[in-house]
Amino acid sequence: MTIDWQQETALRQADFITDLKDLLEVASVRDDSKATPDAPLGPGPKDALLKMLAIAERDGFTTKNIDNLVGYIEIGPKDAEEYVAILSHVDVMPAGEGWETDPFTPVVTADKIIARGASDDKGPGMAAYYAFKILSDLKVPLKRRVRLIFGTDEENDWTGMTRYFEVEPAPVFGFSPDAEYPIINGEKGNVQVVLNGEATNGGSVKLVAFESGLRTNMVPGIARATVVTTQSEALVAAFQEFLAANAQISGNVEADGDDVKLVVNGKQVHGAMPETGENAGTYLANFLQDYDFGGTAKSFLTYLGTPAHQDTIGEKFGVNYTDDVMGPLSMNVGIQKFVAGQEAFINFNFRYPKGITPDEIVAGLTAHLDGWDVTPTIGGHAQVPHYVAPTDPIVSTLLRVYHEQTGLPAHDQVIGGGTYGRLMARGVAFGALFPDSPDTMHQVNEFALLNDLYRSIAIYAQGIAEITNLD
Ligand SMILES: [Zn+2]
């Protein structure tokens, strides 16, 4: 049976865009403040899951919803014991500020679709679904079952996908369409380190509030601080000079008597590639740290403004490390918060290769506290480094399919992770970002190139057919 996968994709493009727009319209950001027993992550993630499963049911597929946290669509012979898993997610990052269009009103142009989730991961997930449709419509013979599984909490704690692996039998192998091509067969370890202490003052300048960053896995794009000083005019002038001297950021400042509000705009990017962003928070701390703050405000600003500033490999903390196969450690200072009288809080996200441990990272952060009475602790869900050898047929087959469909060079690679691929011993991430396409995941004005999504449908259809029929 010879199938022209790209021709089959072309026949379904219009339907694909219609379904994708429907899914993108659901603002599926986790919101614990609206959580209920029926919607444990808030209404958005649940509604997006129900929308995706409803599309599949409309088309006659078998589906299952597990506690409104995770669900799947299944194809293949019902009596086959083994199954292959494709792991996607329908939750999205918070939109962030500065969008040119409404993040949850998809805009389709000549060459792209713009919306939060277009590239991470609703576009690629819908591409995998359309691959399922092609395999089903053409009755392509499959030796195993295949499940397309949608999590609802990938951007935070993986609550849904963790539940799936607790209650369902494990797949034999699989991939996650939630990263980039050619393939991701290795992922670094991923750990959050949290500092949480008192927020006090004591100097002639007072830090009322400091806030930057929404998520551990995003480089903060905006930082805001409110300070009180009798020298407000001088502070305003110095801040304007600071902005002028740092062209990579922008900002503004307003003084009302002794109260000064300062804002820094940096560059918000994915926390796995912090070197491509500009951390607004550490810039603002770097500016403020030299003023006469006291109490923990001084420690907080100095820590952020000196060892944590303009360092995305942990060099100043002495935790920089590079592994031959897995590459360098990376560091993102994702959440920075100080509310006088309440708390001082910093959340670091480290992606680390084999050869260095979370305990060694914590020791490096502790060594630079310089008298600040706070203890760094490991928070969130830590992940160890993950690696599938390039000789594994799951890797070599998907790379061959990618090359056949695109003509592009195919090679294995390791990233800062972590994708759902790591949930399977023989799990990888496969697409859907192409090497020469702009990466807008987690950024404002997120988009996916239409041709990239169409190419992915064809790649996934052939790829799923081939790996499902591996010996
Ligand atoms: Zn994702």
Image (cartoon, rainbow, N blue to C red):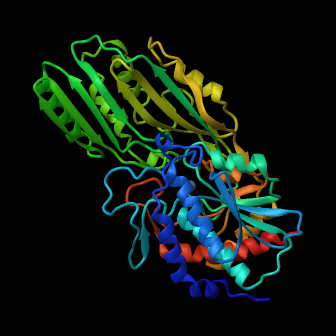
Residue 408 makes an appearance in the image = no
Snapshot quadrant of residue 15: bottom right
Residue for point 71% across, 84% down: 137
**360 relative to 119 in the view: left or right:** right
Residue for point 41% across, 23% down: 344
Q: Is residue 247 above or below residue 469?
A: above
Instruction: Give the tally of numbered discs.
Output: 0
How far from the left and from the top, in percent, is residue 274? 47, 44
Q: Is residue 94 above or below residue 232?
A: below
How far from the left and from the top, in percent, is residue 340? 33, 20
Please state, as top left, top right, bottom left or bottom right, where the N terminus lies in the image.
bottom right
Which one is in front, 400 or 195? 195
Residue 337 makes an appearance in the image = yes
Please state, as top left, top right, bottom left or bottom right, where the C terminus lies in the image.
bottom right
How far from the left and from the top, in percent, is residue 330? 54, 40
**79 relative to 445 in the view: left or right:** right
How far from the left and from the top, in percent, is residue 206? 25, 18
Residue for point 30% across, 23% down: 289
Which one is in front, 28 or 67? 67
Residue for point 41% across, 61% down: 104
Q: Is residue 336 above or below residue 85?
A: above
Q: Is residue 130 above or below residue 342?
A: below
Q: Quadrant of ligand 1?
A: bottom right
Which one is in front, 206 or 43? 43
Snapshot quadrant of residue 345: top left
Snapshot quadrant of residue 464: bottom right
